[in-house]
Amino acid sequence: MTAVKDRIIELFERHREEPGSPYEESHFLDFLVKPGQVLDSFRGARLFSAFIDEVQLECAVCFSLKDLESNYSISQFAVRVEKLQRSPRGSLQSFRKQYKSSGISGITIVINWFAFVMGWMMARIPGAVPPIVIVAVAANAYLARFDWRFRRYRNLLKHRIETLAAERRLSTP
C-alpha cells in the first residue's frame, strides 16, 4: 500500500493550491484549496476533478459516484484504489455508468438555438448579426475543444482499465 499511497500524496501535492502546506490526513481532499476556502467552489471543484482524473489515469481505476462523494482519509483512499486495481470489473462498471455520453450535445443545441433566435430577432438591425454569429462560433469551438479533450481522456482511461483487466486475467491461474 505504501507505493500507492506515496503516489497519491505526490499527485495530491501536485494539484493543491498551496503545495507543501500542512494538511490533515483524515480529510485530505479538503486541503486541495487554501485554508478557509471551500472545496465546493468552482476552483475547488476544478482542483478536485483534476486530482481525481489524474489518479484514475495513473492507477487505471474509475471511481464510482459514491467514491467521489466520500470523504476518505489518505489511507482509506489508497486502500480503495488498490481494491479497484485488484478487481478492474468494478472500475469498468463505474466507467460505463459515468461515461455513457459526453453531455455536451444538449448544451450545444441550447446555445445554437439561442444564437439563432437572437440572430432572427436582430436581423433588421444593421450590423447586429455578425457579433451574434461570432459569439456562437466561439462558443461552439470552445465546446468542441472541451468535448474533444473529454473524449480523449475517457478513451485513454477506458483503455488503461481494460489493459489492467486483461493483465489480471492473464496472471490469474
Image (tube, grey):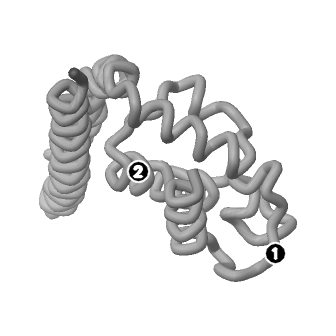
Q: State the residue in front, 172 or 1.
A: 172
Dot 2 crowding, Cα within 10 Å, few <14, some 14–19, many 20+? some
Mark closer to the chain start, 2 or 1: 1
* Residue type marked 1: Pro
Q: Is residue 64 found left or right of 164 in the rendered image? A: right
Question: On the image, which quarter does residue 21 sit in?
Answer: bottom right
Q: Say which residue appears at 68% left-offset and 32% top-offset.
A: 70
* Residue type marked 2: Asp
**Distance between the Cα atoms at labels 2 and 1?**
23 Å
Q: Is residue 89 found left or right of 151 in the rendered image? A: right
- Which residue in the structure is indicated by mark 2? 53
Q: State the residue in front, 12 or 140.
A: 12
Q: Is residue 115 found left or right of 18 in the rendered image? A: left
- Circle 2 or circle 1, nearest the eye: 1
- Which residue in the structure is indicated by mark 1? 22
Rendered position, 107 above or below 33: above
Q: Say which residue appears at 40% left-offset and 56% top-offset.
A: 54
Q: Could you tell me which quadrant the C terminus lies in?
A: top left
Could you say where residue 14 lies in the image, as x and y percent from the top left?
52, 74
Could you say where residue 90 lies in the image, as x and y percent from the top left?
39, 20
Q: State the residue in front, 44 or 129.
A: 44
Could you say where residue 100 lies in the image, as x and y percent from the top left?
25, 21
Could you say where residue 50 lies in the image, as x and y percent from the top left?
46, 57
Q: Helix, strand or loop at disc 2?
A: helix
Q: Is residue 107 visible?
A: yes
Task: Assess whether mark 1 and mark 2 are in contact (beta carbons under 8 angstroms).
Answer: no
Q: Helix, strand or loop at disc 1?
A: loop
Q: Say which residue appears at 47% left-offset and 33% top-offset.
A: 63
Q: Say which residue appears at 67% left-offset and 63% top-offset.
A: 32
Question: On the image, which quarter does residue 151 sit in?
Answer: top left
